[in-house]
Amino acid sequence: MNERLDLHKLVIASLMAALIAVGGYLVIPIGPVPIVLQNLFVLVAALLLGSSWGSAAVAVYLLAGAVGLPVFAGGGGGLGHLFGPRGGYLFGFLAAAWLVGKISESSRQQPVAEILAMIIGGLLIYVIGVTWLKTLLGISFGKALAVGMYPFIIGDIVKIGAAFTIVKSVRPLLGIARRDGRLATPAGSGQ
């Protein structure tokens, strides 16, 4: 594999991990699960970087939070946050990044497929997060849905639109294009 391409992907993945963390500082507390922008940046990372590097960006973010850095929603950090009521959503970010990236790679960045991928990824985050919330708090699925999904649906639809717009605008600036499902180097990079 090309070292220049690896460095390019590493830099973008690191930037995406940082943006996911920043998305946790923009918080609207509404219950055990706040409204944040983290899932927006998870989707952007997956579409820009694909399954491997997109999920690597999320894994770096989760690792940073697990060791205590204040990167989780509202500036939280540590294993207590990772395994608390919001933990399912955090682990859902990892699964969604891989799945959305995989669909994007397979579809060769077809817009309809990428939008569907983000919808599926969002649903995957809900499935993992709501199930985790229900189990951890010992509440019914109805209550878990009421506090862990329903308040977020409209915002998540807006975030999907924003993620698609961001990726569409940023891909050419970063020189990101996929050929045969693989991330290609920026144009004019001497390859």
Image (cartoon, rainbow, N blue to C red):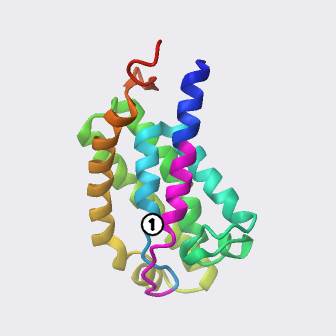
Identify the residue position indicated by label 1 in the image: 126
In the rendered structure, does residue 171 fall within the stretch colored magenta?
Answer: no
- The image quarter containing residue 105 is top left
Above or below for 23 versus 11: below
In the rendered structure, does residue 24 fall within the stretch colored magenta?
Answer: yes
- Residue at coordinates 57% horizontally, 74% vertically from top-left? 86
Quadrant location of the N terminus in the rendered image: top right
Q: Count of labels shown?
A: 1
Toward the top, the furthest residue is 191
Magenta residues, start to end: 13-31
> What's the amino acid at mark 1?
Tyr
* SS label for mark 1: helix
Q: Depth check: 157 or 18 in front?
A: 18
- Residue at coordinates 63% horizontally, 75% vertically from top-left? 76
* Residue 117 percent location from the top left of the image: 36, 47
Q: Depth check: 131 or 176 in front?
A: 176
